Image (tube, helix red, strand yellow):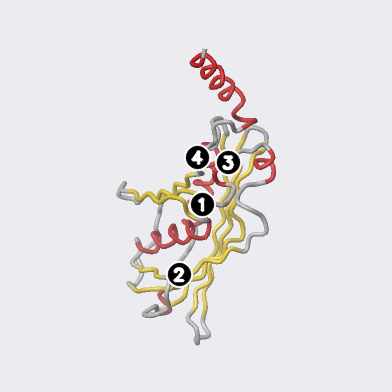
């Protein structure tokens, strides 16, 4: 009887997962597929991230249906994929830390070493999170990411700005999988749209 009821429960979950999120027990996993820009003059920058979102990571519809439960506190896992096929996995990151890690690895592939402190940095790279969220609309997961980057050096008048925006929709057929894919695509588009060439002006 126990096995039978477990099978029944699994069938019900699979049938109603798009509406109930009944198998969405793991954290959202964001896969960032790095497509770096042209190489820059090697150097070190101070990389900072500020979160200016007015909403939370999980949108109201997903919260109401109790989907993406494990990420409702804002925690996600991150996989960064390099052009050579290698990848790095990190777990249980805040939204700001996830963006910091993704941008750091992008900069690393174009010759820029990103650190948290200011000592030895040729410039300051400030990433602002304006939007980064995922929600449910019907049977689709929809994600939107909007980021801006301000590059400057304290005490110098010149500055440089670049922006990135990405959005994606995926069928949310199996709990959090649709949300993870939509968020991965949106973040990948947003960060890969950055143009860091202005860093050459701070050598």
State the residue position of label 3. 68
State the residue position of label 2. 47
Distance CA(mark 2)–CA(mark 1): 18 Å
Indicate the quadrant where residue 174 lies.
top right
Distance CA(mark 3)–CA(mark 1): 17 Å
State the residue position of label 4. 26
Relative to 137, 99 lies left or right: left
Q: Nearer the viewer, mark 2 or mark 4?
A: 4
Query: Between disc 2 and disc 4, whose residue precedes?
Result: 4
Number of disc labels: 4
Identified at 34% across, 61% down, the residue is 109
Residues at badges 2 and 3 in contact (C-beta under 8 Å)? Answer: no
- Residue 57 in the image: above or below residue 194: above
Distance CA(mark 2)–CA(mark 3): 29 Å
Q: Which of marks 3 and 1 is in front?
A: 3
Identified at 34% across, 49% down, the residue is 87
Distance CA(mark 2)–CA(mark 4): 29 Å
Identified at 40% across, 53% down, the residue is 34
Query: Between disc 2 and disc 3, whose residue precedes?
Result: 2
**Percent position of residue 90, x then y:** 40, 51
- Residue 128 in the image: above or below residue 57: below
Q: Residue furthest front?
A: 1
Element type at mark 1:
helix
Residue placed most toward the observer, 30 or 64: 64
Q: Nearer the viewer, mark 2 or mark 1?
A: 2
The quarter of the rendered structure image containing the C terminus is: bottom left
State the residue position of label 1. 187
Q: Nearer the viewer, mark 1 or mark 4?
A: 4
Q: Residues within 10 Å of mark 1 (few under 14, many from 20)?
A: many
């Amino acid at each position: 009887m126990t096995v039978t009821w477990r099978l029944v429960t699994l069938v019900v979950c699979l049938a109603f997962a798009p509406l109930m999120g009944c198998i969405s027990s793991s954290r959202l996993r964001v896969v960032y597929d790095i497509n770096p820009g042209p190489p820059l003059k090697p150097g070190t920058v101070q990389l900072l991230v500020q979160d200016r979102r007015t909403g939370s990571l999980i949108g109201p519809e997903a919260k109401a249906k109790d989907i993406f439960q494990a990420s409702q506190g804002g925690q996600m896992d991150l996989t960064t994929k390099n052009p050579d096929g290698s990848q790095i996995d990190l777990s249980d990151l805040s939204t700001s830390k996830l963006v910091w890690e993704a941008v750091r690895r992008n900069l690393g592939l174009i010759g820029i070493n990103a650190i948290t402190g200011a000592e030895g940095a040729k410039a300051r790279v400030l990433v602002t999170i304006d939007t980064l969220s995922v929600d449910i609309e019907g049977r689709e997961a929809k994600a939107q990411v909007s980021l801006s980057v301000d590059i400057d050096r304290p005490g110098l008048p010149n500055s440089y700005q670049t922006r990135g925006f990405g959005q994606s929709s995926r069928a949310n057929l199996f709990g959090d999988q649709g949300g993870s894919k939509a968020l991965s695509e949106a973040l990948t588009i947003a960060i890969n749209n950055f143009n860091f060439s202005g860093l050459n002006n701070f050598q």
